[in-house]
Amino acid sequence: MRNKFIYIIIFYLMTLAVSSVTAQNYNPFNQRDDQYRLLGLKRAKEAFEINRAEYERQQTLFEKDLITRVELDRAKSIFSDAEVNYQQSLLAVLFEKQYISVTSAVKYHGQDGSKRVSLTLANTSGGTAEFRKLLNIDDALFRSLQPDVINNVYVSLLNEENAIISQPYEAKITELQYGQPQKIDFALLLDVDVVTVFLIYGNGNQRSMKIFLQKDATVNQVAVQSEQFSQEVGLGKKANYDLTLELFSGTSNTYSLEVVNLPRQISRHFNDASGQVRLRQVKFTESSRTKQAVLQIALPDRSTDEVIMDEPIPFYVLAIPNDKTDKFADAGTKE
């Protein structure tokens, strides 16, 4: 009986010695872990597995009354620290691999005539499944950290001077999941063709991209605008209307310019932006989808039945695709 008692005491002391060596000699920290996060994660994972196995062994010894509750709690504390360190290392790697792409940025006209941008963002942090297999990470833990979700994405549109030109000034996507792009719609406070998309997401990651805006090709039209949309002109005088022509088309790039609803007694013609060269057609290119032109009209010297003093004359400027000009052959006289 006495020999058995001595054997148990010796075994217990040896157990404590092994536990002490394991806890003291294994140091998972390395000063380069912050720089090489994947290696730091592997180190943290190894420490987690070692301390988990040790905690489970200590639980078995406690159930057999071979160690005290204090010793079990100490093993549990060490295991918990290793688990937190492992999860933090995993999150650091996941955050480092987060990536957001702009898949489309389309400029279009709103129903109220405002210029708008439809922005599509995608979570392109692919490869998380391969990443999980590479490290042999527990499925439940990996899913709990939501590796395929980027949280709290803030988006703004900036001009060349990095001033916000979008309304809202900043839009938020609460969750951007992998494989599920999301659209955000902005009103442009400044009419531009190039914007900087500024993103803040995840744990403070930032990204900015200078993007040439696509035009909404589905409408197949040219938007015509003029700041001098209303003028008073005396008989025998001329008036100039500066025009901005912006292409929204994916099929046609050459357009004829016509004026609708002006009486025949009023002469009219289009010039280029310099006012020196007359225009009948405007051709757009991929790199130049906005053109400037001038409409010049001249009133007759005397009033007529159609040109009445102090009576407004509403008229319209049309940009017509070349393949449809025949339908507007009499555009100058149409009401």
Image: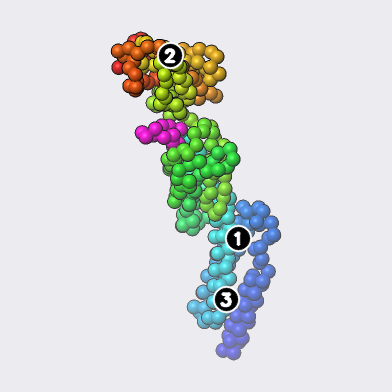
Quarter location, residue 334: top left
Which quarter of the rendering shows the C terminus? top left
* Point 58% across, 85% down: residue: 4
* Point 45% across, 36% down: residue: 117
Task: Please tell me whether mark 1 sits on a helix, a strand or a loop.
Answer: helix
Look at the picture and state if 215 lies above or below 124. above
Residue underneath mark 1 = 44
Relative side of 63 to 259, left or right: right
- What kind of colouring is applied to the model shown? rainbow
Mark earlier in primary sequence (2, 1): 1
Relative side of 169 to 110, left or right: right
Disc number at residue 74?
A: 3
Q: Position of residue 324 (x, y in %)?
A: 37, 13
* Point 51% across, 33% down: residue: 192
Quarter location, residue 2: bottom right
Foreground mark, 2 or 1, reads 2
For the residues labelled 3 and 2, the Cα–Cα distance comes to 101 Å
Mark earlier in primary sequence (3, 2): 3
For the residues labelled 2 and 1, the Cα–Cα distance comes to 88 Å
* Point 41% across, 35% down: residue: 114
Is residue 202 among what the camera can see?
yes
47 or 112: nearer the eye? 112
Task: Please tell me whether mark 2 sits on a helix, a strand or a loop.
Answer: loop
State the extent of the magenta-drawn residues as a range.
107-120
Mark earlier in primary sequence (1, 3): 1
Residue underneath mark 2 = 236
Look at the picture and state if 294 lies above or below 59. above
**Amino acid type of the residue that numbered disc 1 sits on in the rendered structure:** Ala
302 or 254: nearer the eye? 302
